[in-house]
Amino acid sequence: MIFPDPSRIPTLYHEPNQIQDRAPTDYENLLADAIESAFAAGVWELEPLMARLNAEGVKRADGTPWTAESFEAEIARLAE
């Protein structure tokens, strides 16, 4: 996969999570796929999303189940 050089993208179009300088990790891909699947199934609320991730065995990076608080913290961390 080729990543764009952020210095060549007009600032107006900069979205930090879209101009990463590395490929997503396996963990990030798994989480993104699980969230996308949940959205496609009509799961839009936070608590049902946590229940679905946990039921499907999609664990946090440390192997523990998701909570609303841990999910919000992880999404904020990944967005940095």
Image: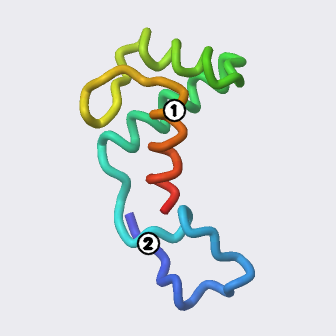
The residue wearing badge 2 is 3
**Is 18 displayed left or right of 41 in the figure?**
left
Residue 20 at x, y percent in the picture: 45, 68
- Is 80 situated above or below 26? below
Residue 69 — which label? Answer: 1
What residue is at 72 percent from the left and 18 percent from the top?
Answer: 42
Q: Nearer the viewer, mark 1 or mark 2?
A: 1
Residue 80 at x, y percent in the picture: 48, 63
Q: Hey, which residue is sitting farthest front in the picture? A: 69
Residue 46 or 24: which is nearer the viewer? Answer: 46
Q: In which quarter of the image is the N terminus?
A: bottom left
Q: How crowded is mark 2: few (under 14 residues within 10 Å), some or many (20 or more)?
A: few
Q: Hey, which residue is sitting farthest bottom in the picture? A: 7
- Is 20 situated above or below 62? below
Query: How many angstroms separate mark 1 from mark 2 (CA)?
Result: 32 Å
Count of numbered tags: 2
Q: How is the image coloured?
A: rainbow
What residue is at 36 percent from the left and 20 percent from the top?
Answer: 65
Callout 1, which amino acid? Glu
Regarding mark 2 in the picture, which secondary structure is present there?
Answer: loop
